[in-house]
């Protein structure tokens, strides 16, 4: 039996989310229609409002409804350290660690010529201007440990070298609590190459 046009439209709308297939989308749609109409209205209102009002922070490019996000407005942040990440969710992951207190620049992706994503799409000229004019003493590259993330990091090193004294890369390797016999060879290779002196 085919779904009615509005139900099909709702199911198809849920399928735009990452990791949501046909069955999951159908389950969500039926849950909202059968059990939680108020939740559906709240979701609809929140989606409409966020899609119309949320943009990018003018400084770091994280998602926010303000011209500058809370991080960029905070006087407690170290303005001389800049962490470059691929996505806004990377910023939140780093913030949850509680171990970084500098500023950010969000690329909103990584270099991928096959997908048509080059330096302009990532606003790398804006990043270069920030590093050049804001007296950044250290740039931390926190791109993902993928082929594209590594290529992006290498490109950024070459681009930013003339404008800052220190460019670092976050460590990749064995997770805390991990057992070596269960770690894949590539991860172990990264861990060995990035080893540090025991102090």
Image (tube, helix red, strand yellow):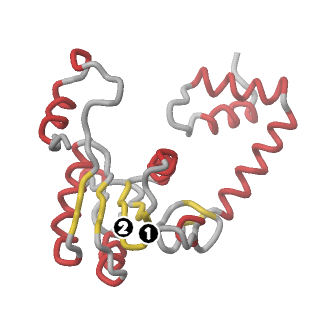
Image point (72%, 54%), residue name: 48
If the image is split into quadrants, where does the C terminus sit?
top left
If the image is split into quadrants, where does the N terminus sit?
top right
In front of the other: 126 or 28: 126
Query: Up-down: is 193 above or below 154?
Result: above
Image point (42%, 57%), residue name: 108
Quadrant of residue 5 in the image? top right
Give the farthest residue toward the front. Answer: 199
Query: Up-down: is 59 above or below 113?
Result: below
Query: Up-down: is 31 above or below 44?
Result: above
Decide: marks 1, 2 in contact (CB < 8 A)? Answer: yes
Determine whether the residue tagged by mark 1 lies in a helix, strand or loop. Answer: strand
Image point (56%, 38%), residue name: 17
How far across and how far down the image is residue 143, in percent? 31, 51
How far across and how far down the image is residue 52, in percent? 68, 62
In front of the other: 102 or 46: 102
In front of the other: 11 or 168: 168
Which label belongs to residue 78? Answer: 1
Image point (58%, 67%), residue name: 69
Determine whether the residue tagged by mark 2 lies in a helix, strand or loop. Answer: strand
The count of marks equals 2
Quadrant of residue 42 in the image? top right
Which label belongs to residue 146? Answer: none
| Mark 2 crowd level (few <14, some 14–19, many ≥20, 10 Å Cα) | many
Q: Is residue 97 left or right of residue 25?
A: left
| Mark 1 crowd level (few <14, some 14–19, many ≥20, 10 Å Cα) | some
Quadrant of residue 165 in the image? bottom left
Which label belongs to residue 81? Answer: 2
| C-alpha gap between disc 1 and disc 2 | 6 Å
Q: Is residue 175 left or right of residue 189?
A: right
């Amino acid at each position: 039996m085919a779904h009615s046009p509005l139900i099909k439209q709702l199911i198809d709308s849920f399928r735009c989310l990452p990791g949501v297939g046909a069955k999951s989308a159908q389950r969500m749609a039926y849950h909202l229609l059968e059990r939680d109409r108020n939740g559906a209205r709240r979701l609809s209102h929140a989606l409409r409002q966020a899609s119309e009002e949320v943009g990018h922070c003018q400084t770091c490019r994280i998602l926010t409804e303000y011209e500058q996000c809370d991080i960029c407005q905070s006087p407690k942040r170290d303005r001389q350290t800049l962490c470059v990440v691929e996505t806004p969710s990377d910023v939140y992951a780093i913030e949850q660690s509680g171990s970084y207190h500098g500023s950010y620049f969000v690329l909103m992706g990584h270099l991928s010529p096959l997908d048509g994503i080059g330096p302009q799409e990532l606003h790398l000229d804006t990043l270069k201007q920030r590093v050049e004019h804001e007296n950044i003493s250290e740039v931390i590259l926190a791109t993902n440990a993928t082929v594209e993330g590594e290529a992006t990091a290498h490109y950024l090193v070459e681009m930013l070298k003339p404008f800052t004294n220190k460019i670092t890369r976050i460590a990749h390797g064995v997770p805390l609590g991990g057992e070596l016999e269960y770690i894949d060879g590539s991860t172990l290779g990264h861990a060995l190459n990035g080893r540090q002196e025991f102090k």
